Image (spheres, rainbow, N blue to C red):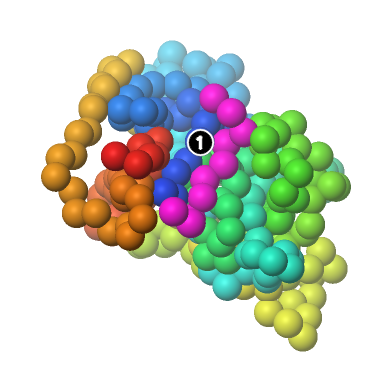
Amino acid sequence: MGGCFSDVRGGQEAVGGTQQRPMGGVGVGVGVGGGGGNNGGHNDAVDHFFRARGQPALFSQIELSLSASKLRDRDVMSKSDPMAVVYLRKRDGMLEELGRTEVILNSLDPAWIEMISLAYQFETVQHLVFHVYDVDTKYHNVPVKTLKLKDQEFLGEASCVLSEIVTKQSRSLTLSLHNKNLQVGLRKLGTLTVRAEESVASRTAVEIIFRCSQLENKDMFSKSDPFLRISRVVESGGLFLFAKPKLSTTT
């Protein structure tokens, strides 16, 4: 599917994806279906133990969506191309990577589409760490999973406990980004907003094809480059952007 990039400029398209999610994904039409992902510590044996005895499982599968605001601009001729990486801090202090977002091109206020799936353990304190990077232009055709993070420019990090997000009425938490030494510094690095939503696995797949006609031409010397943004209503009642189908050019 490609390198998993999206561009705020022009069509604002999202290309590719790092993984299928339980809530589904979007293609050239819009295909929605089931899938899997990193479970962030979910233990199938423990789950089976409780279910076999008629007791509810001690976890809930959730998805995290990320957005940022007022990121630091690391590029000279354009804006940064940010990507976020989510980690789970283990008991020994080591970081276990849970997933990566796509790269948003030329934006200091990205709203990433790629969601991070993990299991919310009710009786476990789960420390999450978020790193934001500016992906170098020469890596724009490289799949995000294979990107070497040491080759990208670090924009900031934030951390929290998963329960801080899940227990809020809005199911969202805004964190200030700071340097790796936990110092915000003289220059603000922006904020990161994390939203959690319980995911429901589904075996049903639906394909939706959108078509427009007689659109108003907004370009002077060529035809418009239309694009589509699809949002859904989340548990808190707000709208969440979850799809930007492939851009159709000069139509």
Hey, which quadrant is residue 19 in on the image? top right
Hey, which quadrant is residue 88 in on the image? top right
Residue 32: x, y in percent?
A: 32, 26
Q: Which residue is mark 1?
A: 15
**What type of secondary structure mainly makes up the magenta span?**
loop
Q: Give 16 or 20, whichever is nearer the viewer.
A: 16
What residue is drawn where x is 45% and y is 21%?
35
What residue is drawn where x is 29% and y is 19%?
205
Residue 58: x, y in percent?
A: 48, 34
Q: Residue furthest left?
A: 214
Residue 87: x, y in percent?
A: 69, 45
Relative horizontal placement of residue 32, taking residue 1 as reference (left or right):
left
Look at the image and give the residue range highlighted in magenta: 1-10
Q: Residues within 10 Å of mark 1 (few under 14, many from 20)?
A: many
Q: Give 230 or 165, whichever is nearer the viewer.
A: 230
Q: Is residue 84 above or below residue 14?
A: below
Q: Quadrant of the C terminus?
A: top left
What residue is drawn where x is 18% and y is 39%?
212
Q: Residue furthest front?
A: 221
Q: Is residue 63 visible?
A: yes
Q: Give 153 or 92, whichever is nearer the viewer.
A: 153
What residue is drawn where x is 39% and y is 28%?
27
Relative horizontal placement of residue 216, taking residue 71 as reference (left or right):
left
Q: Residue furthest bottom?
A: 186
| Amino acid of disc 1 | Val
Query: Magenta stretch: residue 3 in it?
Result: yes
Q: Quadrant of the N terminus?
A: top right
Relative horizontal placement of residue 167, taking residue 222 as reference (left or right):
right
Query: Magenta stretch: residue 35 in it?
Result: no
Hey, which quadrant is residue 40 in on the image? top right
Residue 14: x, y in percent?
A: 47, 41
Q: Quick one: SS at disc 1?
A: loop
